[in-house]
Amino acid sequence: MRIVFLGSGAFGLPTLEALATKHEIVHVVSQCDKPAGRGKTLTPTPIAAYALTRGFALTRPLDINAEDVRQQLRTLEADAWVVIAFGQKLSAALLEGVFAINLHGSLLPAYRGAAPIQRAVMDGCTQTGVSVIALAERMDAGVVYATRMMDIVADCTSDDVHDALSLLGPEVVLDVLERHARGDLHGVVQDELQATRARKLSKLDAEVDIARLDARTASARINGLNSWPGCVARIGPLTVKLLRVGALPTRLSSSAATVAPGVLTREGHIGAVDGPIAVLEIQVLGGKPMAMSEFLRGRAQLIGATVHPGAGSSS
């Protein structure tokens, strides 16, 4: 099949690589290069970078719905458009007469919106998945052609889940395209009564008041914020990011239930309302990620300090 691929984030990379082995990629559309790193060097998106290495025809429009872009894509006479984490809304005029599918990082109709993976982890979900849907006027509301499910295991961050979900994409997208080619593709209308929203994250989400939450809620919230915007906290004079934490099993935390909410222990635990959470990975702002045991080495003065929510950071 002749495929136009529209994507920007790394979430779509495994699927684009798989499509390139099974079909003909006639064009790739991605977002414009953006400043990155301390030097703010203009950097292509992961999808654009891959397209450049493979020599695929590549367009990086400011507006995907501009008339000249629409005309350019129409002349390609593609059999299908595959859209994954592209970053711009495609207009009805652009999609008219086009078979276009989207890989979304949730089991729709749950978690429609910009941050389905992060919100699922933050909410403490034990399962999630991907859905292949038709493009529709309303965001993520198209008929569902296929889904794949996976478990969210303990202590997983949203980055972990993102990477695992991206690997589900190739099989399910290729299956949908094969059924479309056979004329055997049928979609299921989403139940609007079950629809939930996955609001885009902001720096304000970086503050988690562990002292006011139960251990499992605090753990899920913190792990869901990794890697952006991250959970920012203050421990004594230091501003840190809590990168990965875990709620301690009841049999282990019961003996430590006397730890005051918000207080850091010598074991690297922080008291929540119903018992402590274990900090597994931490990062001093401006430094490198490290294990909590390494962080505490030489910082005995922080034992017994109260961990406060910190100001959000863009780093």
Image (cartoon, grey):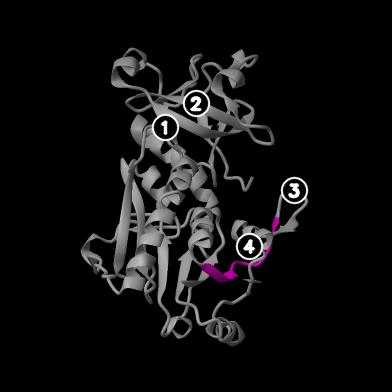
Of 94 and 182, nearer the camera is 182
**Of pointers 3 and 2, the one earlier in the residue sequence:** 3
Does residue 34 belong to the magenta stretch?
Answer: yes
Residue labelled with disc 1: 155
Residue 51 — which label?
4
Q: Is residue 255 left or right of residue 244?
A: left
Could you tell me how far apart the alpha carbons at marks 1 and 2 are, in whole angstroms?
9 Å
The magenta-colored residue range is 24-35
Q: Is residue 130 left or right of residue 208?
A: left
Q: Is residue 129 left or right of residue 63?
A: left
Give the mark toward the camera: 3 or 1.
Answer: 1
Q: Quadrant of the C terminus?
A: top right
Of 275 and 224, nearer the camera is 224
- The amino acid on which the numbered mark 3 sits, given as a three-letter code, is Arg
Element under disc 3? loop
**Of pointers 1 and 2, the one earlier in the residue sequence:** 1
Residue labelled with disc 2: 280
Of 288 and 45, nearer the camera is 45
Could you tell me how far apart the alpha carbons at marks 1 and 4 are, in whole angstroms?
34 Å
Choose top left, top right, bottom left or bottom right for residue 155. top left
Residue at 49%, 78% in the rendered image: 78
Residue at 48%, 76% in the rendered image: 90
Give the mark toward the camera: 4 or 3.
Answer: 4
The answer to whether any part of residue 26 appears in the image is yes
Q: Are marks 3 and 1 in contact (CB under 8 Å)?
A: no
Label 1: how many residues lie within 10 Å, few (<14), some (14-19) or many (20+)?
some
Residue labelled with disc 3: 38
Give the mark toward the camera: 4 or 2.
Answer: 4
**Of pointers 4 and 3, the one earlier in the residue sequence:** 3
